[in-house]
């Protein structure tokens, strides 16, 4: 079939043109539009009070990186990861009592590796029988 014949058949209604495919519409929104001013203030306050960003993000159905970006947009810097001085003291105290690292980490609220690496960096000796 020639192009002229094809166009003639199309004009006569025998051949229907293909519908144009438009890209699917996606809903785009700013993350701040999902929360009221009071909800944002509460999230910021809870984070500043010491709650973990991972927990707060999960509760609100957003990614941790999104939550941290939301905090940054409101002038709140992310806390440095690692142990607070109080947790470091508690780890040393518990280790001095002979407690194993796994139990120390659970009691203090940090990972096993965080507690272990901290203790390895410390110069103070601890009981060798509890080095697990």
Image (cartoon, rainbow, N blue to C red):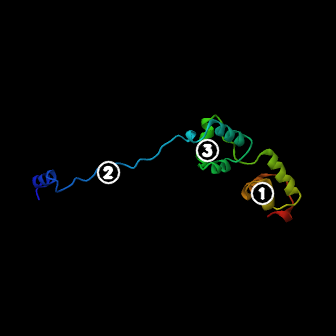
- N-terminal-most mark, 3 or 1: 3
Residue 9 image position (x, y, % from top left): 13, 55
Lower position in the chain sequence, tag 2 or tag 3:
2
Check disc 2 and report the residue beneath it.
21
Position of 40 relative to 8 (above/below): above
Neighbourhood count class around disc 3 (C-alpha, 10 Å): few under 14, some 14–19, many 20 upward? many
Which numbered disc, 3 or 1, marks the residue closer to the eye?
Answer: 3
User: Quadrant location of residue 50?
Assistant: top right
In the rendered view, does 106 fall on the left or right side of 80? right
Mark nearer the N terminus (2 vs 1): 2
Q: Are marks 2 and 1 in contact (CB under 8 Å)?
A: no
Q: Residue at x 59, y 49 (%)?
A: 63
Q: Which residue is mark 3?
A: 67
Residue 123 in picture, x, y percent from top left? 82, 52
Within 10 Å of disc 1 (Cα), the crowding (few <14, some 14-19, many 20+) is some
Q: Is residue 74 left or right of residue 19?
A: right
Mark 2 neighbour class, 10 Å CA radius: few under 14, some 14 to 19, many 20 or more: few
Query: CA–CA distance between discs 2 and 3?
Result: 36 Å
Q: Residue at x 66, y 37 (%)?
A: 38
Residue 79 placed where, x, y %? 69, 42
- Quadrant placement of the N terminus: bottom left
Where disc 1 sits, the SS reads helix
């Amino acid at each position: 079939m020639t192009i002229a014949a094809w166009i003639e058949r199309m004009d006569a209604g025998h051949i229907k043109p293909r519908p144009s495919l438009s890209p699917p519409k996606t809903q785009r929104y700013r993350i701040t539009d999902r929360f009221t001013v009071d909800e944002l203030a509460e999230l910021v306050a809870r984070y500043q009070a010491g709650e973990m960003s991972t927990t707060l993000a999960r509760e609100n159905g957003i990614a941790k990186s999104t939550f941290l970006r939301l905090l940054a947009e409101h002038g709140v810097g992310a806390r440095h990861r690692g142990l607070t001085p109080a947790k470091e003291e508690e780890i040393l105290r518990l280790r001095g009592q002979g407690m194993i690292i796994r139990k120390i980490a659970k009691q203090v609220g940090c990972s096993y590796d965080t507690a272990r690496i901290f203790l390895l960096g410390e110069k103070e000796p601890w009981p060798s029988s509890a080095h697990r």
